[in-house]
Amino acid sequence: MPNSSLDATATKTVAFDLPSYLNRHTKSVNSALDHFLPKATAKPQTIHKAMRYSLFAGGKRMRPVLCIAAAEACGGDVNDALPLACAVECIHTYSLIHDDLPAMDDDDYRRGRLTSHKVFGEGIAILAGDALLTQAFEIVARSKVRKRYAHQDLIIELAQASGSLQLIAGQVADLEGEGRKTSTNQLRYIHERKTSALLCCSARLGGMSADCSLSQLKALTDFGYHVGLAFQVIDDILDVTQTSEQLGKTAGKDTAAQKATYPSIVGLEKSKRIAENLTKRAFAALKPLRGKATALKSLADFLLKRDR
Ligand code: GRG
């Protein structure tokens, strides 16, 4: 039975000019990241070149844009959200560098170019990931805070999302699950931690930069959680439906590594329906934010329909 309020939300989404929104904010994020990171000429040059190589390799910048859109949805200023948006992108890029290492997924391509360890060697790739992780916390510690949330709150937020109970827990469960029979519950556990936690954290940090109320924070948490899960279900689908050229990374890796994914457990069609339902739940979570959540809605719709 179609839900008419969700249909109305989807119609509004179409009117929003998301490509120019993404373009504008991607530029601000890139220039802020350039400002926050040590120059490529700073000694030792190898590590700063390696950090910048992965960070400026053409990632989609979905987490930082989500952070900015969440801030705007709570009446905040983009400039207050930018440092937090950059910190999340540094953590995300570190996790990709480490995930691609021979000891983990052993991938040669990421973001359309050779992976860090292929270009700089394993030692420097590990250190580039470590340095980006550390850089993220420095950026947050130096950011301007408003009334309701102190630096401590922001740092705890980022540490929890990227720590051993969330991002790293997801990666551990993913590594340990390879080649084993996995239930949908276990798969959801992995997706919640490996992917949804950081997307949810991006939305929450955006709200916190705008001094959001507790009910706004709750709405952003619910939204980020569902968008994050939908994002990973779509990622699982794209791994089997797209080519390596389209994705900018090796396609079909999940199947080759005998990894449990939504398509491998429930099939492609059901996976698409699951992603659509998660996105509807994300739309519904935005109700308390009323008219200000247009960019967030449009972003969730874009993430559902993305092809890379
Ligand atoms: C190594 C600590 C550690 C964690 C690794 C992020 C991660 C956990 C693994 C990377 C592989 C993977 C499938 C992660 C799930 C999250 C995800 C879909 C990452 C890719 O995000 P995109 O599509 O990438 O936003 P870009 O390059 O566009 O930023």
Image (cartoon, rainbow, N blue to C red):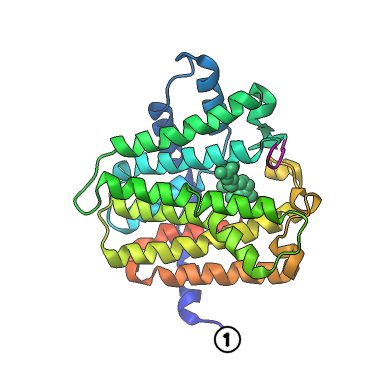
User: Does residue 21 appear to the left or right of 102 in the view shown?
Assistant: left
User: Is residue 149 visible to the viewer in this orientation of the structure?
Assistant: yes
Secondary structure predominantly adopted by residues drawn in magenta: loop
Q: Quadrant of the N terminus?
A: bottom right
Q: Seen from this angle, which residue lies furthest bottom?
A: 1
Q: Residue at x 46, y 74 (%)?
A: 8
- Label 1 sits on a secondary structure element that is loop
Q: Residues within 10 Å of mark 1 (few under 14, many from 20)?
A: few
Residue span colored magenta = 103-107
Place residue 37 in its image quadrant: top left
Identify whether 86 is placed above or below 204: above
Q: Nearer the viewer, residue 133 or 246?
A: 133
Can you name the residue that lies furthest to the right here?
Answer: 256
Q: Quarter-wise, where is residue 235 in the image?
A: bottom right
- Name the residue type under label 1: Met
Q: Position of residue 3 (x, y in %)?
A: 51, 81
Residue at 52% x, 27% y: name it: 52
Residue 5 colored magenta?
A: no
Is residue 304 visible in the rendered image? The answer is: no
Q: Position of residue 39 (x, y in %)?
A: 44, 19
- Could you tell whether 248 is left or right of 28 in the image? right
* Quadrant in which residue 27 is drawn: top left
Picture layout, residue 246 above or below residue 281 = above
Residue 112 picture location, percent across and down: 67, 36
Task: Count up the numbered dots.
Answer: 1
Q: Determine which residue is flagged by label 1.
A: 1
Residue 104 on the magenta segment: yes
Position of residue 199 measured from the top left corner of the image (x, y, whole percent): 48, 54
> Residue at position x 63%, y 61% from top?
233
